[in-house]
Amino acid sequence: MDSFKKLTSSAVPLEIKNVDTDQIIPARFLKATTREGFGENLFRDWRFDLDGNRIEDFVLNNETYKGKILVAGNNFGCGSSREHAAWAIHDYGFKVVISSFFADIFKGNALNNGVLPVQVSPEYLQELFHEIEKDPNTQIEVNLEAEKITILSTGAQSGFEINTYKKTCLINGYDDIDFLISNKAEIEKFEISRV
Amino acid sequence: MKKTLFDKVWDAHVVKEIKDGPQILYIDKHLIHEVTSPQAFAELEQRGIPIFRPDQIVATADHNTPTENQHLPVKDALSRNQLAQLTTNCKKNNITLYGLGHKYNGIVHVMAPELGITQPGMTMVCGDSHTSTHGAFGTIAFGIGTSQVAQVFASQSLLLQKPKSLRVNVNGTLKAGVLPKDVILYVISKLGTNSGTGYFCEYAGNVFEEMSMEGRMTVCNMSIEMGARGGMIAPDQTTFDYIQGRKFAPKGDEFEKKVAYWKTLPTDQDATFDKEYNFDASDIEPMITFGTNPGMGIKISDHIPVKDNPTFEKSLDYMNFKKGQSLINHPINYVFIGSCTNSRIEDFRVAANYVKGKKKADNVTAWFVPGSQQVAEQIIEEGLKDVFEEAGFKLRQPGCSACLAMNDDKIPEGEYCVSTSNRNFEGRQGRGSRTILASPLMAAATAIEGKIIDFTKQMN
């Protein structure tokens, strides 16, 4: 897994609430058997019409907005548990998703793929949308070690929470499998104790 | 300390607590299907890690499978490849697979309970958010991502933070024509799609106590639609009776011993929850959804609410509905009875009871898709197939089908589908399709009338 410490980037604003994982990656693209290549179909049905033409007013098709940060409305990633949603976001090039609320399974999937979900207050989220609208090149600094996010042009700062274990994993690029396997003796002991 | 049902099951599965971090939770049963497992198998293979407990894994093919001509090779090359990979992976790793055509094949959340794999007090996971279904048995069951599928493959455990607790109580008498699906759609319409996020939910009250296991599974299935990772109902005599005699259920003395343990699981009298909601059963009516998330539901007699916010308006635009509109008499060309929410025998009994002696509307294309081979067989045994055929309906073969339209069962662009499934997201049933979630009774009535009706008027 990629490691993550700190990132400064402009952002892509997606001011829609309850973005579900069926929109992030529609089910018809789940037939692949590898993790790669999902980025081209990220938000497929919002990016392209039925004939495959770009829908120009969708934000991902708007050249004005670029960056490694996706800023999205409340309750991002609800619905299906498909990790393909996190793979698509990662493969497209986003390293951070900012929202005022994340669905549980998506949040876990993102963290397991080196994508940092940053939960901020609804007010701070509005401030982000406002600043990006004013200046699409607004630089946002996400500092995982300090658990802080800053809008560099205004200095407006907000903290965010992440559990200590997951933070360590992300900073070092560790995943849960190694950790679980290192506890195998205890898992086996637990199994015997239940018989 | 007084404990909830959830606490009791969770605490019995904690292998270890990490300081300032998550807990290692032991997983009793791991269900897998073709869509969310291939990358997990590949990852383990790449890293040279063996599957730790293959005998605690059960596999089925369901998401991609055709619902017609299952004896023929699967037409779509990508689907065929994904199904073949599941077969290869299971064989290589000694995992039991109930693949396409097997007498136990079916939707993972239908076949596991009916085989007695799902039992009270267990922890169960699957790379599928509707794993919450199994909570109907007093089981901690929840959906996981593919990285977590790999973790369970490697260690039969997961690293998790214990979720908060939530209880939804529904007490009183349900009106005629109100089914378990209406109860859960009503609850979600009241609480919204993220009220349960971060929580595990328990459903309590006489309404759930009096429900069949099929009904309880419908309710728990949709817990994730309010954001809760899982939902549970305390095991009771209804649960024990359902399990007894099933293929993988404990037998004889072992069964009695288990029942004695299962009886200790219900929430202690004075246990407290982080959040609690109470609803009056008599307020619930048959429900339908009008928008693009499962929380956007109304009673059949109600009108679409009038709200001014861009997300709400975007949703109504997609559905081509107007604020303040009633959906009664709205023409419908597609009806789907199926999915892990409503494809069990009881759902088809309800539908058959309604359509008996009536005829399908000419404008309607109806897909009736049993949840498993066993349900399909039971439909024939009980004579329901004849009832459906006399009314002009044809049964299809088991699978997830039009719930997520990964196979050929897609609703065309712009068309409405009254569906017994669980999600009405944009394009869920096919690109541009418009889903209206409802109970099997509402779906059956729509299929007969060719439009949405308030069938309770026929009952009075």
Image: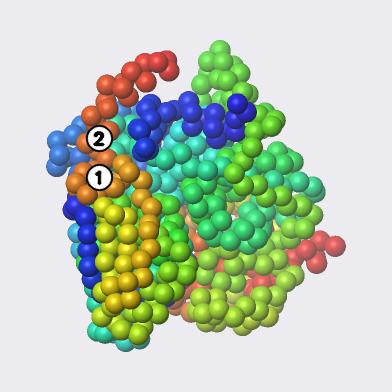
Depth check, front residue: B207 or B85: B207
Q: Is residue B30 above or below residue B78?
A: above
Judging from the image, what secondary structure is the residue with disc 2 in?
helix
Which residue is painted at 59% across and 67% down in the image? B296
> Where residue B265 sits: x, y (%)?
60, 27
Callout 1, which amino acid? Cys
The quadrant in which residue B182 appears is: bottom right
Here the colouring is rainbow
Q: What count of labels does the image hold? A: 2
Query: Chain for mark 1?
Result: A
Q: Is residue B268 left or right of residue A144?
A: right
* Outermost residue toward the right in this view: B460
Which residue is painted at 59% across and 80% down in the image? B308
Answer yes or no: is residue B337 visible: no
Q: Is residue B74 left or right of residue A20?
A: left
Q: Are marks 2 and 1 in contact (CB under 8 Å)?
A: yes
Depth check, front residue: B10 or B395: B10
The quadrant in which residue B273 appears is: top right
> Where residue B221 sits: x, y (%)?
54, 49
Q: Provide the residue designation for mark 1.
A: A169
Q: Is residue B25 above or below residue B443?
A: above
Q: Earlier in the sequence, mark 2 or mark 1?
A: 1
The quarter in which the N terminus of chain B is drawn is top right
Q: Is residue B78 left or right of residue B127?
A: left
Q: Provide the residue designation for mark 2.
A: A179
